[in-house]
Image: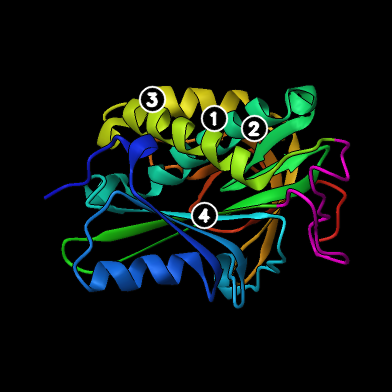
Amino acid sequence: MTSNPKTAAAPRILLDVVDSTNAQALRLAKAGERGPLWIVAKEQSTGRGRRGRAWISPAGNLYATLMLTDPGPARAAPQLGFAAALALHDAAVAAAPALAPRLALKWPNDLLCGGRKISGILIEGEGNPVAVAIGIGVNCRHHPDATEMPATDFAAEGADVDAATLFGHLAEAMQARLTLWDRGAGFAAVRAAWLSRALGVGKPIRVRLAERETTGCFETIDDAGRLVLRTAKGEVEAVAAGDVFPFGQAA
C-alpha cells in the first residue's frame, strides 16, 4: 500500500526530545507504520545530517520528519529531495516573506539565506516496501558557529519565526509539492521550479567529491537530479553526490 500524498492532514507525533526524528520514523516503519506520518521534536539528542555529520539540535529550532511508504518508483528516488526542498523554500517564504529575496536553494538539499545555511534536508530509506524518512532541520532561533558552510538562523536575520508556525507552513507546502512531483511524473515542473530558486546556476562553483575536488560552471540539474558541471576544458560532468561551495569559498 502506498502513502496517501495528503501530508498536510497526516497524523503528527510531537515529542519533547528524541535521538533523531528520522531514526524514530524508520523505527516506526520497521514496526509496521506506513504513513504518511510526521515526527516533530523540540530537541534532538543525536541529530544527523548528510554523510553522518552531526546536526546540532537545541530547543527553538524545527526538527521534523515526514515518513512515507513507497512514495515513488526507485528510479525517481533522487528526485524526492528536490520536491522537499521546494516545500521548504515555500514554507520559509510564507513564514518570513521579507527574507524571500535572500532565500535560495543549494544543491542538493540545503536552504540558504544571504549565502548562509539556514536549513538542511536528509532523506533516508529502508525496508520492503521502502519506507522513506524526509528529515528537515531549520535554524529558527539558533545556529552553530565555525561550520564549514557558514550558518545562520531566522532570528539572526531579523525574522521572528516560530518553529510550530513554520511547521504548519511546511506540512501544507510538502503536500502541494509532492502532488506536483506525482511519483516522478511531474519532475519536469519540480526541476524548473527548483532551478529558478537555486544558488549559482550559470556561475563557477567548487564541488567536493568523495576522492577529489573539481570546479566548473553549474549549468543545470538533469532528469536524475544530478548536478551538471561544465569544466574549464569544456567537458560536461554529471555529479550524483558531493558538497557544493561558491567559487572562492574554501572547500
Residue bearing mark 1 = 194
Rendered residue at 87%/64% (across/down): 145
Residue drawn 83% across and 37% down?
A: 114
For the point 80% across and 23% down, which residue is it?
Answer: 98
Q: Secondary structure at mark 3?
A: helix
Residue 198: which disc? 2
Mark toward the viewer: 1 or 4: 4
Residue 64, numbered label? 4
Q: Is residue 233 left or right of residue 71?
A: right
Q: CA distance from mark 3 to mark 2?
A: 15 Å
Q: Three-letter amino acid code at disc 4?
A: Ala
SS for dot 1: helix
Distance between mark 1 and mark 4 Cα atoms: 21 Å
Q: Amino acid at mark 3?
A: Ala
Q: Earlier in the sequence, mark 3 or mark 1?
A: 3
Calculate the distance from the C-alpha at mark 2 to the C-alpha at mark 4. Answer: 23 Å
Disc 3 to disc 1, how far (Cα)? 10 Å
Q: Quadrant of residue 105?
A: top right
Residue at the limit of the structure toward the left, as seen here: 1
Q: Quadrant of residue 154?
A: top right
The boundaries of the magenta stretch are 139-158
Q: Which residue is mark 3?
A: 188
Q: Main secondary structure of the magenta part?
A: loop
Which quarter of the image is occupied by the C terminus? bottom right
